[in-house]
Image (cartoon, helix red, strand yellow):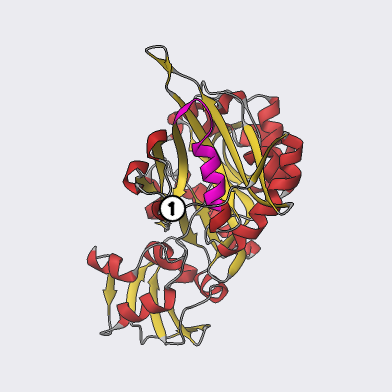
Amino acid sequence: MTVEIRTCKNKEFAAGISPIWQYFGVEPDEELNSSFSRILPAGRIHAAFDGKEVVGSTSSYPLQMTIPGGPVPIAGITLVGVRPTHRRQGILSKLMKQLLEGAHERGEAIASLWVAEETIYGRFGCGMASINGDIRIDREHTRYRKHWDRLEASQVSREQALERFPLVYEQVAPRSPGMLSRTRDWWDVKRISDYPLDRHGAGPLVYVLFERDGEPAGYALYRHRTEFVENRFDSTLEVREALGVDVAATAGVWRYLFDVDLMAHTRAEYMPIDHPLFFLLAEPRRLRFRAADGIWMRLVDVEAALRARSYASGEQLVLEVVDAFCPWNDGCYRIEEGEVSRVKGGADLRLEVRELASTFMGGFSFAQLARAGQLEELRSGGIACADRLFASSPAPWCPEMF
């Protein structure tokens, strides 16, 4: 039977997102499907139908993400899966093609995602755009290099967190490449939710608000994982998210977390590679930072994406971009005085679209890619010029998997 690729109707929502769940050992119920439907319109689910059965699907959240220059609309790729019965039939390629074409038609110049398997997404033009990592630090090694004033901390309810935490986040996200602009529904469904499936044996989610002079300055979401070894506490504080509006607030939030009673260890995931803790702590090595790839990006419309970005200097650079999967991007682009235009020839660098995605937010340099043999310098000095233009700080970071 011929497999049909199309977007889903509202009544097909649950079936449309069903192929991925078995890979995570999840049997979705009505509550889970209802929650996802609040943040993912059915029309953004691309499904492969074998008769009436959905055998594969890809989806994209309608999101905004901060890039150097400010927030832009993106397609947040998620819930990608093909049933084992229908693998190796080209279904995923067709689904990804339709998803990217849909994003292009909507004017979403960028797509972003977290990848389960790196080797899958490179062939669709996606490139690794950031590095993040996990930390696990023992309580006795959490001393700071200098004293920081403590913030006023209060444990709040889920409802209070929904009202107050965004006041902190909205100060941080616009200046941090890779962070998402969160709607109220996104906060409710994705960040402060406390689904039993998410606990993995740990306790309920705790919500703590930090204030300075009566104004929200930080927040933390965490769980207690209680363990005993030889009749002594060997428990871990598992941090889902901790933010401060500035370095002093960040220091205050983490000081509180490190000092929670009866916790022998503090663990956190999705930490940026340039987190202030590396210089706040007297013993940063004790963080045991384990690095991994963070978000990946796909430039759906190279010209529009380049125009949306800000640049560090007024030099001129011409990039020749190769894009076999989305051929509308194939060509040369000149960046001059912050303006971007499509030109014919005269390129300083030639690279695949996935490599441009890796450098787009400043997470990786053109020189790094050149050392790995992933781009071609056509004019002497072109690599150095590109690195000056695309330089950005802080490092790109997304504190949540979507």
- At label 1, which amino acid type do we have? Leu
Q: Residues within 10 Å of mark 1 (few under 14, many from 20)?
A: many
Residue found farthest to the top: 231
In the foreground, 37 or 42:
37
| Numbered disc 1: secondary structure | helix
Residue 35 percent across, percent down from the top left:
69, 35
Residue 383 percent across, percent down from the top left:
31, 77
Magenta stretch bounds: 250-264
Figure quadrant of residue 100: bottom right
Residue ID at (35%, 68%) = 365
Q: Which residue is mark 1?
A: 280
Residue ID at (56%, 46%) = 253
Residue 195 percent across, percent down from the top left:
63, 28
Q: Is residue 202 above or below residue 185?
A: above
Tell whether position 263 is magenta: yes
**Is 15 positioned to the left or the right of 270 in the image?**
right
Q: Is residue 179 visible?
A: no
